[in-house]
Image: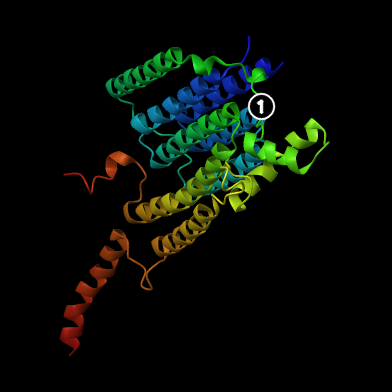
Amino acid sequence: MNALFFWIFSAAMIVCALVVVLGRNPVTSAICFAFTIFFMSGLFVMLDAFFLAAVQILVTAGAVMVLFLFIIMLLDLTEAEKVPRQKVWMGLSLLLCLGFLYVVALTLNATPEGAVSIESVPSYAPHPLVMATRIENNPGASKGFLADLGDDTHRIGRLLFGTNATPTANNLYPTTYVAPFEVTSLLILVATIGVIVLCKQDDRPRPSPREQITREAPSKASTPETASTR
Amino acid sequence: MNITLNHYLAVAAVLFVIGLMGVITRRNLIIIYMSLEMMLQAANLTFVAFSRFNGSMDGQVFVFFVITVAAAEVAVGLALIVALYRLKQTTQVQELTTLKF
């Protein structure tokens, strides 16, 4: 059953990705990209990453793709590309990509560690040290209770904000990702300021070339007149 | 047939390669940008797969960060495209040759 879903999701994802790259219409590409993300979050669910599946749909398929569509509509790029494609260039890139895939296939073949079935790996088992302290602190508790560290949302939150990261004997609940998290907020602030600076119009609107001509033409014609009236 | 880690990695590699092809062959700046985004997502899939098969959540936290950075990057990139479009009235890369030597 899991295998069936895996094949469905990955086939649909790759087909949508191909449409994004090969389609001639930008709007079709954007919508197919949203579907690619949708099927990828299906794969995330199969990997027990439920929180990330939700975030992926909300942020990437929701916010980012709407932004893309918005820009495509705003700039009126909706008509399809008319420039003919360079066959040689496409062939070369295809060759490069196939070479890359070949190297990946060789690597995957050479690593027997990768050939482990998903059913045989426990889903996010707690770290042995954490497990040991839990057994110490909760004598007589059931094994299921001890192994339960909460769902993945819970655990990502704890990892981000300070407890249950990879523990050591000295530091059982180290803080790991708070600093990167704060730096991310700084990054978003910088991005916001950057967008405002980039998109801010001058107070004087920059005249387009045609406007410049029409503006200059009457002024040239009017200068002799004003000179003669004076 | 059992699904293994290699299956997920292979699918991610295919997705990455499709994105790479888009970046190389397409002429429209927005499509190129979308393909870049796709390559980032392929990396995300690899992260989640490794995270699941190693039984550690750190990979998922990294994906969380990657999604955030990608969103910020998209905002800045699209602002650049809009600014460029105001200047040149086009998003076709073959016409944007100001930096070409």
| Residue in view at x 61 percent, y 16 percent | A117
The spot of residue A1 in percent (x, y) is: 72, 15
Q: Nearer the viewer, residue A12 or A164?
A: A164
Residue type indicated by callout 1: Met
Is residue A80 toward the left or the right of residue B87 in the image? right
Asked whether residue A165 appears in the rendered view, the answer is: yes
The spot of residue A113 in percent (x, y) is: 51, 18
Q: Nearer the viewer, residue A186 or A31?
A: A186
Task: Using the rendered view, name the quadrant where residue A228 is placed.
Answer: bottom left
Total numbered labels:
1
| Residue in view at x 64 percent, y 48 percent | A158
The spot of residue A89 in percent (x, y) is: 29, 24
Q: Nearer the viewer, residue B16 or A12?
A: B16
Q: Nearer the viewer, residue A101 or A114?
A: A114
Which chain does tag 1 point to? A
Say few, some or many: other residues with alpha carbon within 10 Å of mark 1 (under 14 / 14 to 19 / 20 or more). some
Residue to which mark 1 is pinned = A46
Task: Using the rendered view, name the quadrant where residue A218 is placed.
Answer: bottom left
Q: Secondary structure at mark 1?
A: helix
> Where the C terminus of chain A falls, by quadrant?
bottom left
Is residue A43 toward the left or the right of residue A81 in the image? right
| Residue in view at x 40 percent, y 37 percent | B32
Residue, far top:
B1
